[in-house]
Image (spheres, helix red, strand yellow):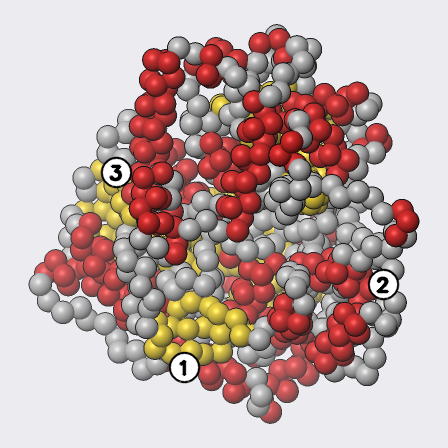
């Protein structure tokens, strides 16, 4: 999958390791979440600053380079040893700031482009094994105005770090322009020193008192969540959006005065208001939400970039209909207790409480609250000034996150929400409820909580945790693999025996122990199970069946080998189902972009023995095998078939055969696929002209990606045959095909050979939708990719953003999801 690059530009020499440290508990949580969903953009911290005045690109880049050298955490990567993650600081990273010039763009289009680039850079994933989990893009809007888009991974950066970074960028850049040395505070320690301190603290007596407080606080606590508009899927998604309203300037003084009158902080006042609103909305007797604290109790940490933030779980119990004033007082005591015991890392709290794990939910908290002043201090540095601007959401962690940000212009109330669970109209009503709660608390604090009218909602029943798939009965206990696996479970969990229905987490397992178990399994067996698999199959029998592919079918009933393998990406709550053909990694994001009601599966041949006579199969035979692997029941409802390039040709035949079997095929989505034989039927001169134009556009497309920092130089070179051949000629390791690329190449060659022999039935298939990426000649729209009477007369041709397969890793996947959603719904 092509992504925005976060690795060093220039020569890819192995960096010198200058220190190896344990991970802090927050870093460990980030690591675990990344293992569950590699490259999860919700773990990104995205910042946008406006810069005005006289500034130089080279000066800004030099300032960021000095900061990276000053803070080891910005030169850090993560490795795994025996299931345990560690952080390694390296001597240097070859940082390069991307620059995108928008000055030639019409002003009325510029803002939309700034937002789209901001969204793309915020959501681009990081590879935690690459040092320097930090990138910067400068958008030049005018000669004296630009935007700095900064994205860092949560494992090395937090909100407080934004303030530190802003001060240091401004001071260093101003000093360079003035020809003086920057005035910066000395750093008495680095982040690795803090990691060592925390490791020691967690083994101390003082930590035992923290555990006792939180054990009492969380005793009998329910899992609090706001009922969603849409059913919850089986796995957690991070597709999010934000709605916000700005409070009038007078609100600032009113809130300050009210907090002083109640002798509480602005934060306590805000937490009381929100908890009251959530209580009235849900009628729940206990409300819980999370909140973040800076975690920088020691002054030595104040000037350090790093992740010190910690999640606190705040519990509010409601009894009789108290007044807002009484509730504000009780909330103040709750928050004071939590702050006095803030050294309990959230990861350790999850281990202590040991809730039932659900891959569709966060542990302990689904709602989050933050109230704070903007981290960046708007101020002038030499000839320019840095101004805080709202940033784009890289992805959501919580179902709902209530955020109040104070800026010089006033307070802004925002709700970031999971767009797969909630409608925008619901969030608008929640914003208004929250605002109304503030008005009552500010103007009528003696009013009872019941005076706050909650909106009426027609909600989907709060979806229960996704059921674990039925476990296959394990093989005989004599099977040495099963015995070895059971011994590993006993060793990791420190229990005397393991039964088939024993649950890993019910026996005291937690995420870190799970990582150790998976590491041992990879060492002992030829299996690479994921953490997400263990969450889905937490029982010993179910987990063993999944990793060993246990089959209880009697030998006499064994089925012939099918070259296709079925992968389930998402179990939907409704009846619509999408089947994608091959390229499982390209369609990775499709499951998250489609509604929760839609199931998404992939069938692929990447693990097939292609030398076993498959090269002699026709497209019709290959399609029949693919359908057998899909195992479609007619009760599944309407289905969609999706194929890219030659797989689009195959998709047409799959759809035809499915209809013959009585399946309701609502859509056959064919992406960038010309009808077999059409292109070579064109005059030679026309073919040559089209090929030249394609090569020119391809070069321009990937060069733009390279210059904007969205592709690594090595991956850029691999996009072109000449440079790729040179890389292989000189033995550059990165120029060799990965196993996945080799499998894709082999399968594609097999399908292309079969497609050349294929004669599409001229049946005017009404389900076909043609999709065209920027890689395909614009004439394809008028020519309908040469399919003639094989497709319906009114077959639509939909343009999708991106270049061929690259379109399925960028905005093009949204275009595809939108098309499929409408067709599956009957549109």
Q: Describe the element under mark 2 as helix, strand or loop.
A: loop
Residue 193's label in the rendered image is 1
Q: Can you give x and y, in whole percent of width and height, for residue 13 in the image?
A: 31, 63
Q: Describe the element under mark 3 as helix, strand or loop.
A: strand
Along the line of sight, the residue nearer the viewer: 535 or 442: 535
Q: Can you give x and y, in whole percent of width and height, for residue 470 in the image?
A: 84, 54
Q: Nearer the viewer, mark 2 or mark 1?
A: 2
Confirm or deny contact between disc 2 and disc 3 (CB under 8 A).
Answer: no
Instruction: Quickly name the residue at label 3.
Output: 101
Residue 350's label in the rendered image is none
Residue sitting at x 81%, y 83%: 496
Confirm or deny contact between disc 2 and disc 1 (CB under 8 A).
Answer: no
Q: Describe the element under mark 1 as helix, strand or loop.
A: helix
Q: Is disc 2 surrounded by few (<14), some (14 to 19) or many (20+) residues within 10 Å?
A: many
Residue sitting at x 65%, y 22%: 652
Comes first in the chain, label 2 or label 1:
1
Residue 9 falls in image quadrant: bottom left
């Amino acid at each position: 999958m092509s992504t925005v690059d976060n690795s060093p530009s220039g020569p890819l020499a192995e960096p010198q390791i200058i220190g190896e440290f344990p991970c802090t508990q927050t870093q460990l949580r980030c690591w675990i979440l990344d293992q569950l969903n590699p490259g999860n953009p919700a773990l990104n911290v995205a910042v946008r600053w406006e810069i005005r005045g006289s500034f130089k690109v080279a000066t800004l880049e030099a300032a960021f380079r000095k900061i990276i050298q000053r803070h080891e955490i910005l030169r850090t990567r993560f490795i795994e040893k025996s299931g345990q993650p560690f952080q390694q600081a390296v001597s240097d990273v070859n940082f390069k700031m991307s620059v995108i010039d928008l000055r030639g763009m019409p002003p009325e289009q510029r803002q939309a482009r700034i937002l789209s680039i901001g969204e793309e850079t915020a959501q681009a994933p990081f590879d935690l094994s690459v040092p320097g989990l930090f990138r910067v893009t400068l958008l030049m809007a005018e000669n004296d105005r630009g935007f700095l888009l900064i994205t860092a991974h949560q494992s090395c950066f937090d909100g407080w770090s934004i303030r530190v970074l802003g001060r240091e960028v401004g001071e260093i850049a101003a000093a360079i322009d003035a020809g003086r040395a920057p005035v910066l505070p000395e750093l008495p320690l680095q982040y690795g020193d803090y990691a060592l301190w925390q490791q020691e603290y967690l083994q101390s007596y003082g930590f035992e008192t923290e555990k006792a407080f939180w054990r009492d606080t969380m005793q009998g606590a329910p899992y609090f969540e706001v009922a969603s508009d849409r059913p919850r899927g089986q796995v957690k998604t991070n597709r999010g959006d934000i709605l916000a309203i700005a409070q009038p300037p007078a609100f600032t003084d009113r809130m300050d005065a009210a907090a002083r009158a109640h002798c509480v902080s602005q934060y306590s006042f805000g937490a009381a208001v929100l908890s009251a609103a959530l209580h009235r909305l849900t009628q729940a007797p206990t409300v819980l939400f999370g909140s973040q604290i800076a975690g920088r109790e020691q002054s030595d940490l104040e000037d350090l970039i790093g992740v010190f933030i910690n999640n606190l779980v705040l519990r509010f119990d409601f009894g009789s209909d108290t007044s807002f004033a009484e509730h504000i007082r009780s909330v103040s005591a709750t928050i004071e207790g939590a702050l006095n015991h803030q050294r309990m890392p959230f990861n350790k709290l999850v281990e202590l409480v040991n809730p039932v794990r659900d891959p569709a939910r966060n542990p302990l908290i689904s709602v989050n609250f933050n109230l704070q002043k903007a981290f960046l201090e708007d101020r002038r540095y030499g000839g320019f000034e840095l101004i805080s601007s709202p940033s784009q959401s890289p992805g959501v962690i919580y179902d709902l996150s209530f955020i109040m940000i104070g800026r010089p212009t006033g307070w802004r109330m925002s709700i970031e929400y999971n767009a797969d669970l909630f409608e925008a109209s619901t969030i608008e009503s929640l914003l208004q409820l929250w605002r109304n709660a503030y008005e009552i608390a500010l103007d009528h604090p003696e009013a009872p909580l019941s005076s706050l009218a909650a909106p009426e909602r027609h909600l989907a029943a709060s979806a229960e945790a996704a059921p674990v798939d039925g476990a296959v009965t394990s093989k005989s206990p004599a099977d040495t693999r099963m015995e070895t696996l059971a011994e590993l479970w006993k060793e990791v969990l420190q229990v005397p025996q393991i039964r088939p229905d024993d649950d890993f987490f019910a026996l005291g397992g937690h995420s870190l122990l799970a990582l150790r178990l998976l590491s041992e399994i990879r060492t002992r067996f030829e299996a690479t199970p994921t953490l997400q698999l263990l969450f889905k199959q937490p029982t010993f029998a179910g987990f063993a069946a999944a990793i060993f592919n246990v089959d209880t079918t009697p030998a006499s009933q064994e089925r012939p080998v099918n070259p296709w393998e079925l992968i389930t990406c998402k179990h939907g709550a409704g009846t619509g189902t999408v089947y994608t053909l091959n390229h499982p990694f390209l369609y990775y994001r499709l499951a998250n972009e489609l509604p929760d009601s839609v199931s998404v599966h992939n069938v692929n041949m990447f693990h097939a023995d292609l030398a076993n006579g498959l090269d002699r199969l026709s497209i019709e035979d290959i399609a029949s095998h693919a359908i057998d692997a899909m195992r479609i029941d007619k009760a599944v409802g309407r289905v969609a078939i999706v194929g890219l390039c030659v797989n689009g040709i195959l998709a047409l035949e799959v759809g035809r055969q499915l209809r013959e079997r009585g399946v309701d095929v609502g859509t056959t989505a064919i992406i960038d696929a010309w009808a077999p034989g059409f292109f070579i039927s064109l005059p030679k001169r026309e073919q040559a002209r089209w090929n030249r134009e394609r090569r020119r556009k391809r070069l321009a497309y990937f060069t733009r990606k390279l210059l904007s920092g969205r592709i690594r130089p090595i991956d850029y070179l691999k996009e072109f045959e000449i440079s790729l051949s040179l890389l292989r000629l000189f033995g550059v390791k990165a120029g060799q095909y990965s196993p996945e690329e080799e499998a894709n190449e082999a399968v594609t060659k097999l399908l292309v050979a079969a497609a050349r022999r294929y004669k599409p039935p001229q049946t005017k298939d009404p389900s076909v939708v043609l999709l065209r990426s920027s890689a395909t000649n614009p004439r394809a729209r008028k020519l309908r990719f040469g399919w003639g009477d094989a497709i319906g007369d009114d077959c639509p041709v939909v343009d999708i953003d991106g270049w061929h397969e690259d379109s399925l890793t960028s905005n093009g996947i949204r275009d595809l999801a939108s098309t499929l959603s409408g067709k599956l719904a009957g549109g």
